[in-house]
Image (tube, rainbow, N blue to C red):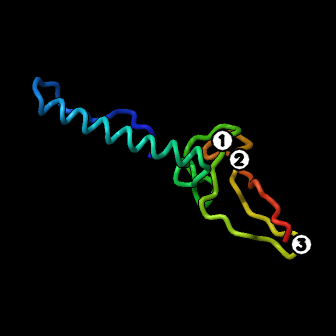
Amino acid sequence: MRVPQQINLPAPAEGVPFLQQMVSKLTSAWAGMASQVNAASEGLITGATNASTAPPTTGDHQRGDMVRNSAPSELGTAGSKYVITHWICVTAGTPGTWLQCRSLTGN
């Protein structure tokens, strides 16, 4: 979930039903945002809005943009095994030039 650009609030009106609808919508929106912030602060992939199984192939990207790997696995040969943790854009463009960021596993 990303922070919504706009929350669809009920049409302005007077009375208790309007206030109940307003509180319900805002409570739901805040609960979703709090859940995502908590997951992101704990390093959980569910908190990331920029996770994928491969680098982007579409869209405008700037140098320094990163996309987390949502499906890491150990790759390589014995003695040189690694995990792709994320991809980083090294040349801006559509989609830009992306390189793997690898972490050695020691295996």
Query: Would residue 81 be found to the left or right of residue 29 on screen?
Result: right
* Sooner in the amino-acid sequence: mark 1 or mark 2: 1
Neighbours of disc 1 within 10 Å: few (<14), some (14-19), many (20+): some
Q: Is residue 18 toward the left or the right of residue 94 in the image?
A: left
Q: Kindly indicate the quadrant of the structure image that contains residue 2.
A: top left
- Up/down of 69 relative to 7, above or below: below
In contact (CB < 8 Å): disc 3 and disc 1: no
Question: Which secondary structure lies at badge 1?
Answer: loop
The circle drawn on residue 88 is 2
Distance Cα–Cα, label 1 vs label 2 = 6 Å
Q: Residue at x 82, y 69 (%)?
A: 81
- Residue behind mark 3: 79
Name the residue nearer the viewer: 9 or 88.
9
Question: Which is more toward the observer, 19 or 64?
Answer: 19
Indicate the quadrant where residue 12 lies: top left
Camera-nearest label, 2 or 3: 3
Q: Looking at the picture, how far across and down is residue 93, in whole percent?
A: 64, 41
What's the mark number on residue 65? Answer: 1
Residue 12 relative to residue 92: left or right:
left
